Image (cartoon, rainbow, N blue to C red):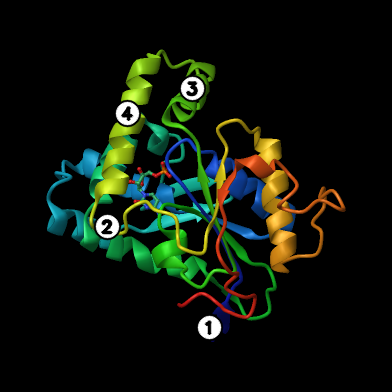
Amino acid sequence: MTPRRRAASVICVDGPSGSGKGSLATALAKRLGWRYLDSGALYRVVGAAALDRGVATDDEAALASMARGLNIELSEGRVGADGLDLTERIRDEAVAAAASEAARHPQVRQAVLAQQRLAGEAPADETSGLVADGRDMGTVVFPSAELKIFLDASAEERAQRRYKQLRNKGVTVNLRTVLANIRDRDARDEGRAASPLQPASDAVIIDSTHMTIGDVLRQALALVRESGLAEAPAGYRAGTTAHDVNQPTIRSSRARHPGAASKPKT
Ligand code: C5P
């Protein structure tokens, strides 16, 4: 018999490429002992498959049909599809561009949605929640999430971070090219009609341009505590609130909290 499943508590971390949302979401999931959903990895698998199979990224019907047929596996930091390990491959710049081109199409997004919503369910006897990172986690995939964070940073800062990451991996790149790629992706992600990149109306916006990942994590943990999602998680500094850690970097905050009782739609 299939075990009963229930809607898990969800924290959404949305934002543009290079804002640090992946680092924040994984660190939060680890601190809380929750599961982590890297929704960008799903779109990257679709992008990689399109490149490998020669499916044009402007052919919505062919892409969607391909995406529906992919058996994508995300587990413990590894990403696979149809039995192939794609963990390293999907981090290519070419794959990132193909992913963002494919992600413009509503039918492709629909194909990926089911897999994302499934991650929002947990076995009925499991108490842990989900930290989901992406572009539309708070606006479309988990609109009733208990906490929504929108992590931003200037395009120049995001390009610098990506440039350092690539250099550390031994990849020879030019900072101007990295910045141009980031701007292209921003334009596509923000300008598309289907689920454009934008903060949910009840998201807390954090600008990480002048913050370290440690600062961002402290601020997010304070928000988690204020939301009543978890008692002071391990490593949380007692007495800290979301509003006294790097206060000037909070550009805006939601008017009200959606409430711990609301659960994501499945
Ligand atoms: O987050 P990441 O850079 O891995 O995402 C790759 C691409 O997938 C993004 O540029 C974006 O176009 C798309 N994406 C999306 N919606 C999400 C996550 C990613 O459209 N929730």
Among the two numbered marks 1 and 4 on one chain, the one whose residue lies closer to the N terminus: 1
Q: Earlier in the sequence, mark 2 or mark 1?
A: 1
Disc with the residue nearer the chain's start (3 vs 1): 1
Q: Amino acid at mark 3?
A: Gln
Q: Nearer the viewer, residue 80 or 62?
A: 62
Name the foreground residue: 179 vs 85.
179
Where disc 2 sits, the SS reads helix
- Calculate the distance from the C-alpha at mark 3 to the C-alpha at mark 1: 47 Å
Local packing at callout 2 (Cα closer than 10 Å; few below 14, some 14-19, many 20+) is: many
Q: Are marks 3 and 4 in contact (CB under 8 Å)?
A: no
Which quadrant holds the C terminus? bottom left
- What numbered label is drawn on residue 2? 1
- Relative side of 255 to 222, left or right: left
| Residue under pointer 4 | 181
Q: Is residue 39 above or below residue 107?
A: above
Q: Residue at image x 65%, y 36%?
A: 213
Return the mark for residue 67.
Answer: 2
Percent of width and height locating residue 47: 29, 44
CA–CA distance in space, label 3 to label 2: 32 Å
Q: Ligand 1 within 8 A of label 3's CB? A: no
Residue 109 visible to an observer of this rendering:
yes
Location of residue 126 by image quarter: bottom right
52, above or below 234, in the image? above
